[in-house]
Image (cartoon, rainbow, N blue to C red):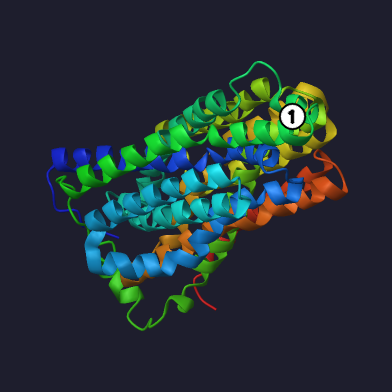
Amino acid sequence: MENTLTTTKSGTQRSIVIIGALFFIFGFVTWLNSVLIPYLKLACELNNFQSYLVVTAFYISYLVMALPSAWVLQRTGYKKGMSLGLLVMAVGCLVFIPAAYSREYWMFLLGLFVQGTGLAILQTAANPYVTVLGPIESAAKRISIMGICNKVAGVLAPIILGAVLFSSSEDPGEAIAALAGEEKIAALNELAERVIDPYLVMMGVLILLALMIYFSALPEVDADAEDEAVAKSNLNKTSIFQFPHVFLGTLALFLYVGVEVIAGDTIISYANQAHGIPLNDAKFFASITLAAMIVGYVIGIFTIPKFVKQETALKISAILGIVFGLLAIFTNGFVSVFCISLLGLANAMVWPAIWPMALAGLGRFTKIGSSFLIMAIAGGAVIPPLYGYLVDIVNPQQAYWILIPCYLYIFYFATKGYKVRSL
């Protein structure tokens, strides 16, 4: 696929900076869920399965909205579409205000769904955009740069929101459990209302960014352009369904998002429930997970494609995921929790590698192929609640067995699946 961005080098760099800012927003909003899960479990008095519906509400929006997002972008273009996505996210933040005052869990879930809808529009635009911003062979490198922006925000998000929601040195769960009657209700209401100020601030920031993107010099790209070889290869192709590697990649991405969300969003609850680490301390493990991902991205930037091919990086990632997952299951205490954090290192290069491998050779089918990959983000809506269900019937540590088959399939895609180009 040719680079179809007809701008100067400085214009391309400016585009990378703008898209990097958007990936920062993706990360900040997405990784707030790791704090919202234990927070809403307390504030709304939920069990484990119910608390993990936080990620279901957030990520199911990608499944529902990915194809409509592609339709929106066809009519608005990338720049206006990104601005629209940011405004939709701001509306989702606004929904948190009445949700907090009423302490109604379904309203929190609605707000998360609306935020996810805005992110679906942004992701549908940003990922193919950065993929075609240069040679396809180095796409994983560019996406790794975006990943650093994403995960730096992810490191900061749980620390910042955790400091606001769990501000007291006393464990809020223990404090509330010691109360009864009107005192308990008042404490729960006070806890729920702590979320109002940070989400009002986020709403303002998102509106400001939407205006900045709308009036920016961000150029349009033709993500569906075909070079001569791709055009010849796709001459008789009439449907995206004639590219099986796209759907094998979609399944790999579905499973990957599930295990990434598990690694980042369950670790606070896992450290607290399984190993007795106070929430005020456990909140830092989510940031360690994302810091490990940043290390993986940096490695990818300096090694792909000069020393390591995208396919090889994906194989190594899958193997590391299996190893760290098994260590988390068979070790105890801090070591087990830290192995879940190390899944961040294993996960770092999976998303950057799958995207160019799954979109390779699509040409004019790139937009629709990207939409299917965005739909795969719904893996974060399905797999973490299954983990939560296993926690309720087994225990938090043994529930991590759900990771192993996911990484095994990712290894299959890295070795054989991406090569399947015909039925």
From the top left corner, tell me how far across and down residue 39 is, in percent: 64, 36
From the top left corner, tell me how far across and down residue 313 is, in percent: 53, 42
Q: Residue furthest front?
A: 182
User: Which quadrant of the figure contains the C terminus?
Assistant: bottom right
In the depicted structure, whether residue 293 falls above or below residue 63:
above
Residue kind at label 1, given as amino acid type: Ile
Please tell me which residue lies in front, 365 or 38.
Answer: 38
Left or right of 407? Residue 377 is left
Query: Residue at 23% across / 62% down in the picture?
Result: 77
In the depicted structure, whether residue 284 falls above or below residue 374:
above
* Secondary structure beneath label 1: helix
Label 1 sits on residue: 176
Please tell me which residue lies in front, 9 or 34.
Answer: 34
Left or right of 222? Residue 272 is right
Q: Residue furthest left?
A: 8
Q: Residue furthest right?
A: 394
